[in-house]
Image: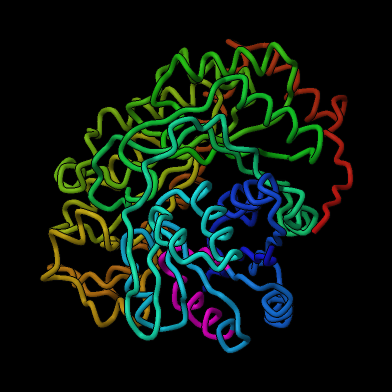
Amino acid sequence: MRKTLLTYVKPHVQEDPLSMILGIGYMGAMLEREGIPIELHDERVATDQEMKAAIERNEVIGFSALTPNIRRAIAWAKYAKEQGKITVMGGPHASVDQGVFLDTGHFDYVLKGEAEYTFPQMLKAIDGNDDAALQEVPGLAAWRDGQLAFDSQAPPLIKKLDELPIPARHLLPMETYFKNNPEHLCYIFTTRGCPFKCIFCQKELTGRGFRVRSTEAIVDELEHLIKTYDPGVILFVDEILTLRKKRIHEMCDEILRRGLKFEWVANTRADCVDYPLLKHMHRAGCRRIYYGWESGSQRMLDVLKKDLTPEVIINAAKMTRRAGIWAKVYLIVGSPGETAADIEETEKVMRLAGPDLIRISVFNPLIGTESWDNYQANIDIADLSENYVSSNRSGYKHENFTQVGLEEMRKNMVRSYERWYYSMPQRTKRFYERALYYMENPVFGRKRLGRAVGLVPPPKRHVVTSHH
């Protein structure tokens, strides 16, 4: 079999904490299971020379990149083709915009949709020089002699997620991630898909359904992850971890039953939590929740089709704090039609809610989303074709703000909120709320006090090695 390289392309800005990549980890595990020689490469922790060497020692080069980084993926594909390699692009952007890759002439194939089963099928067809078998691979588009040779529909979504192997973390540089991330952060997923209709989300890859792994499979992987890598924090990367509350109660029960002690983080929505669930999550190790609120203005929430209200947002924040969990929230500025009054309303709601950290992005209409389809008149296609997007710039030409104005507003909102959050009245308020929490939950209060006076030692970390 031809040896295959799967590489995650380096972002132009590393905004999130550095950790392993799940996507190519799953693909690597599938290829290993099928007996296909595989190497995984994360360009974020490698030099250009190491990237070139990885390309040169493999025959099929598969690329994964988020929308803001597809230009870099195209540049590396060009280098790979110059070395005579077979090039493939997959992932969410490829699933909605294959032309941006194929039209360059630097990619032999684009593979659309969830590819854990179709990528091995494709590689076996390539290895056997079987063009008829290639054309039967769901979701595969091929570029031959300067034109589209064939193009099949994406495969159905994978229903039985428990049948997927756990990610091939042993093929990734785990020790390098940990050196670059003092929290020793690791990722895990328990679901795929999201049923909500926010206009800015690409759903082509994982769909609007909601598919879940079994409690046993999830906690088995958690136990393996903890025993093998001793992570400081585990982030559940699900779009909405707590959509089905009963499922999370069961997961927390199993974590507690097995005596697994670790700190974890959840992504979810304000309307998908309640106090009993949050308290149960905290008992099982949840210490942070990341909420996608986007705005505190009801008008903007409606424009974005969030199906949320400011009242729900504020209540979720209060419940989260009462449960002893720290909250980070994501906001968007520059949504279609947004005004200074909407921004003021958002700032007001943030102060009523009091999250521990806010992160603000500029509204970006991504191809394959409702925002792209509905706001074409305001999208600078030429700008996007050259630069694509990031959290602090956009190809959307706003009705009421300039790009420079939006970026300045984004920065000022964060600075203003942080000044308010760290002011003495707010510090005092949080101290009082923590005291109430520890009175309600004395076991955690004793542990916190013990750590503060040095009677309870911090957890030890062991050295992690990988086969990368």
Tell me where residue 405 appears, x and y as whole percent.
27, 72
Tell me where residue 338 appears, x and y as whole percent.
16, 57
Tell me which secondary structure the magenta stretch mostly adopts. Answer: helix
Is 411 left, or right, of 167 in this rendering?
Answer: left
Indicate the quadrant containing the N terminus: top left, top right, bottom left or bottom right: bottom right
Is 195 left, or right, of 165 in this rendering?
Answer: left
Residue at the spot x=79%, y=38% of the render?
230
Q: Could you tell me if residue 411 is visible in this image? A: no
Tell me where residue 83 appears, x and y as whole percent.
63, 86
Q: Which residues are magenta?
A: 62-79
Residue at the spot x=58%, y=58% of the render?
124
Is 390 left, or right, of 281 in this rendering?
Answer: left
The image quadrant of residue 384 is bottom left
The image quadrant of residue 316 is top left
Q: Is residue 382 above or below residue 42?
A: below
Tell me where residue 123 appears, x and y as whole percent.
57, 60
Q: Could you tell me if residue 181 is visible in this image? A: yes
Residue at the spot x=39%, y=44% of the render?
206
Residue at the spot x=68%, y=25% of the render?
220
Residue lying farthest bottom? 82
The image quadrant of residue 438 is top right
Q: Is residue 322 above or below residue 63?
A: above
